[in-house]
Image (cartoon, rainbow, N blue to C red):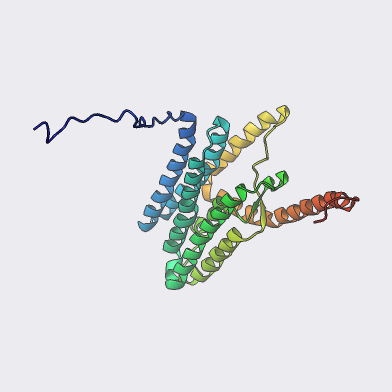
Amino acid sequence: MDELFPPFAPDPNEPKPRRFKPVPFRVIAPNMITLMALCLGLTAIRLAFEGKFEPAVIAIVVAALLDGVDGRVARLLKGTSRFGAELDSLADFVNFGCAPALILYGFALFHLRSVGWIVALIFAIAMGLRLARFNAMLDDPNRPEWKKDFFVGMPAPAGALTAMLPLYLHFLGFSFEKWAAPLVLVYVLCIALLVVSTVPTFSGKTIGKRVPRAWVLPIFLLGVAIFGVAISFPFEVMVAISLAYLAVIPIGAMQYRRRVRREAAVRAPLTDEPGAPRT
């Protein structure tokens, strides 16, 4: 029997099993926030299938708020990682691409049958393409610092929230019958085009890094007032935010072009100097 089953002796030259270092909680925390946002997006899809559009929209709004928090928490805790960035992109595609497209299709676009479904597909794919372009632009080492103040095209959360403007109006008492489905279709298609466009929009990432001490208490009071109004009149606030954001897009584009011309004017004398490289 000993010849049939010889005793096993481990190879002394065999490398030891790799031991992974423990992951600090500061890396896990922002990813947990992203996963909670992803759960909200998936739950919104389920609610839309059940015809519960109001809680579905609220779930998307809360997911957008969490999307604005997770990245800041990661940078604050110094817990940014490649895994977190990829997970955030996946969550954004589900929360702001797939979920709003299905909600809008179940709300009004289904009246147009295949045409409505095609527009829902275009909206979801536009979000995926926009997120892919955003990730690719992060690796550009030649991007000027001031361009961090602007997004290229409408960002995914803003695109999702503004696309659901017909739903906000419906919750406020505006009737969207079958005749209004073509209007919703054109509006959603325009938002999808803005998402994949190269129109510069304000990012707001560099606003408020330093606040004057005299402004601290007024900002607290203003924040409490805004929170109270948003809780008391949520869909009125969402309508106002959506319309205001759409109105600010041309202002952001003009500001971006002004910055480009200013940078070109600064570089022009340097390129005109003798011996300066020509581009």
Q: Residue furthest left?
A: 1
**Residue sitting at 53 percent across and 54 percent down?**
160
Q: Relative to residue 110, is residue 228 drawn left or right?
A: right
Q: Position of residue 230 (x, y in %)?
A: 55, 43
Viewer-proximal residue among 55 and 79 = 79
Q: How many dots with numbers?
A: 0
Above or below, 123 against 28 in this view is below
Instruction: Confirm whether residue 164 shows in the render.
Output: no
Q: Where is residue 190 in the image (x, y as percent from the top left)?
A: 58, 64
Of the 4 image quadrants, the one containing the C terminus is bottom right
**Residue sitting at 16 percent across and 32 percent down?**
6
Viewer-proximal residue among 142 and 87 = 142
Of the 4 image quadrants, the one containing the N terminus is top left
Q: Where is residue 38 in the image (x, y as percent from the top left)?
A: 43, 46
Q: Relative to residue 136, is residue 97 drawn left or right?
A: left
Q: Where is residue 122 in the image (x, y as percent from the top left)?
A: 50, 65
Instruction: Confirm whether residue 87 shows in the render.
Output: yes
Q: Which residue lies furthest to the right in this view?
A: 274
Q: Image quarter for residue 148?
A: top right
**Residue sitting at 44 percent across and 68 percent down?**
117
Q: Image quarter for residue 154?
A: bottom right
Q: Relative to residue 112, is residue 4 drawn left or right?
A: left
Above or below, 91 against 223 in this view is below
